[in-house]
Image (cartoon, helix red, strand yellow):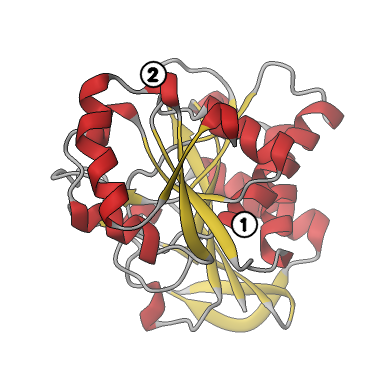
């Protein structure tokens, strides 16, 4: 069973929920979660609403046995640029300012991330969302401690766009694709570049890679062997390769992280050679 997660504290989430109800046949199944009706469209997909901010939803496994949690979320950015985004969650360093625990990552679902990114890219064109960026984001924020795979699919980046109907329809379509996408046997992880992982976007969309956790340049020098090991082990699909955004790292970054990757037996692949 896949569980789609919305929040009463999230305007974008509620806009996406409305689309799922009105256009994808989700309706109350008679059960509740946190006094909110649970919706379903079939026996294998639930739509729930929490009273918490979604980044603090490490408690969901106490209530649901799921194959994956798919979060329908807002994205906030100072740039105010409208955006359609997808990413895995986790805190790669010593801070946990936005949910989860320090030095802990969730179980990523690279096949679901890739499915969402592909659909967001298609929807951007078909819905003429020319002002919207479509992108992967690197691993960040909570929840981190659950042992169920999870993915965030997001509508951003200001309140104006959190209630943007066509943007919400694009995210809803991506979420439905996530809810139907099977897990795969092999995945990769990524290192380097900026928060919006443009090099990795191309590898997913043009070459079919399934990329789970991504550590950007700004986090690399604080990575420990344990957190890199988590990036490998807390990913669905066996991870044998680390894709390196070669120009998105400096010499100090490479000197720090390459020995960690080699100690874990990962093959290092430059983005241009992938």
- Cα separation, mark 1 vs mark 2, equals 27 Å
When asked about the image quadrant of residue 43, the answer is bottom right
Residue at figure coordinates x 63%, y 68% from the top left: 183
Is residue 165 visible in the rendered structure shown here? Answer: no
Residue 96 or residue 235, whichever sits in front: 235
In the image, is 212 to the left or to the right of 207?
left
Q: How many marks?
A: 2
Residue at figure coordinates x 57%, y 27% from the top left: 272
Label 2 Cα neighbours within 10 Å, binned few <14 / some 14-19 / many ≥20: few
Residue 138 or residue 259, whichever sits in front: 259
Q: Give x and y (percent) for residue 124.
A: 76, 29
Which quadrant is the N terminus positioned in?
bottom right
Determine which of the numbered discs, if any, sits on residue 78 in the image: 2
SS class, disc 1: helix
Identify residue for label 1.
Answer: 112
Determine which of the numbered discs, if any, sits on residue 61 in the image: none
Q: Give x and y (percent) for residue 195.
A: 41, 28
Residue at figure coordinates x 26%, y 46% from the top left: 92
When asked about the image quadrant of residue 221, the answer is top left
Residue 37 or residue 242, whichever sits in front: 242
């Amino acid at each position: 069973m896949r569980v789609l997660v919305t929040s009463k504290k999230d305007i974008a989430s509620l806009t996406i929920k409305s689309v799922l109800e009105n256009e994808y046949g989700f309706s109350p199944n008679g059960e509740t979660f946190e006094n909110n009706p649970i919706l379903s469209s079939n026996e294998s997909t639930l739509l729930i609403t929490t009273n918490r901010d979604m980044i603090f939803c490490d408690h969901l496994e106490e209530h649901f046995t799921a194959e994956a949690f798919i979060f329908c979320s807002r994205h906030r950015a100072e740039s105010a640029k409208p955006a359609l985004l997808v990413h895995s969650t986790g805190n790669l360093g010593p801070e946990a300012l936005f949910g989860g625990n320090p030095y802990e990552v969730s179980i990523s679902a690279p096949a679901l991330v890739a499915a969402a990114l592909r659909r967001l890219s298609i929807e951007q064109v078909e819905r003429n969302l020319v002002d919207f960026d479509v992108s992967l984001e690197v691993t960040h924020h909570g929840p981190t401690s659950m042992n169920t795979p999870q993915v965030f699919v997001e509508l951003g980046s200001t309140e104006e766009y959190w209630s943007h109907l066509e943007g919400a329809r694009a995210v809803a379509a991506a979420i439905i694709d996530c809810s139907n996408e099977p897990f795969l046997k092999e995945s990769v992880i990524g290192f380097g570049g900026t928060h919006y992982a443009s090099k990795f976007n191309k590898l997913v969309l043009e070459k079919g890679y399934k990329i789970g956790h991504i550590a950007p340049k700004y986090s690399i020098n604080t990575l420990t062997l344990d957190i890199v090991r988590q990036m490998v082990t807390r990913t669905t699909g066996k991870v044998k390769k680390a894709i390196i955004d070669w120009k998105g790292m400096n010499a100090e970054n490479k000197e720090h992280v390459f020995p960690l990757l080699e100690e874990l037996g990962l093959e290092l692949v430059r983005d241009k050679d992938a």
